[in-house]
Image: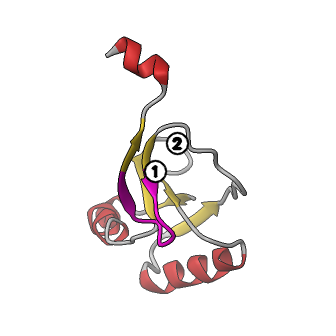
């Protein structure tokens, strides 16, 4: 999501967004928008509900644009269980092993 947040509300916005379990990435940027973040969802149907909830919880946040990625291939990192939680298995590509 690409959003615009008044500078006076940026700190509390970051604090509130960081409590979301769906949050995967958050970046402060310069330009038309000043905050970009990515969330993980289990279905396309949940996108509108998430945006609506976000609008209620953070009414000062101005939504500029959303991008929807339907499938993401995980190349490395922790293997997740059915609830999206980290398991004890870590996948590291062979090329990373050679560089380490």
Residue 66 vs residue 86, the one in the foreground: 86
The image shows residue 85 at horizontal and vertical percentages of 40, 65
Horizontally, residue 46 falls left or right of residue 18, namely right
Mark 1 in CB contact with mark 2 (< 8 angstroms): yes
> Which residue is the site of mark 1?
34
Residue 69 vs residue 96, the one in the foreground: 96
Q: Residue at x 54, y 63 (%)?
A: 40
Q: Is residue 55 above or below residue 67?
A: below
| Disc 2 crowd, CA 10 A, few/some/many (<14, 14-19, 20+) | few
The image shows residue 11 at horizontal and vertical percentages of 27, 62
Please indicate, yes or no, whether residue 29 appears anywhere in the rendered image: no
> Which residue is the site of mark 2?
31
Q: Residue at x 41, y 47 (%)?
A: 27
Q: Residue at x 27, y 67 (%)?
A: 15
Q: How is the image coloured?
A: secondary structure
Q: Please, which residue is most extreme toward the front here?
A: 89
Q: Is residue 36 magenta?
A: no
Residue 79 vs residue 25, the one in the foreground: 79
Residue 57 vs residue 73, the one in the foreground: 73
Q: Is residue 34 above or below residue 62?
A: above
Give the quadrant of the C terminus: top left
Magenta residues, as a range? 79-88
| Disc 1 crowd, CA 10 A, few/some/many (<14, 14-19, 20+) | some
Q: Secondary structure at mark 1?
A: loop
């Amino acid at each position: 999501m690409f959003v615009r947040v008044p500078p006076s509300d940026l700190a509390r916005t970051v604090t509130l967004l960081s409590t979301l379990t769906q949050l995967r990435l958050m970046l402060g940027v310069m330009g038309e928008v000043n905050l970009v973040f990515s969330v993980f969802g289990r279905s396309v149907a949940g996108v509108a509900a998430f945006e609506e909830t976000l609008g209620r919880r953070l009414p000062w946040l101005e939504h500029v644009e959303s991008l929807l990625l339907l499938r993401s291939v995980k190349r490395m990192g922790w293997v997740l269980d059915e609830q999206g939680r980290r398991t004890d298995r870590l996948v590291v590509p062979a090329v990373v092993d050679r560089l380490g």
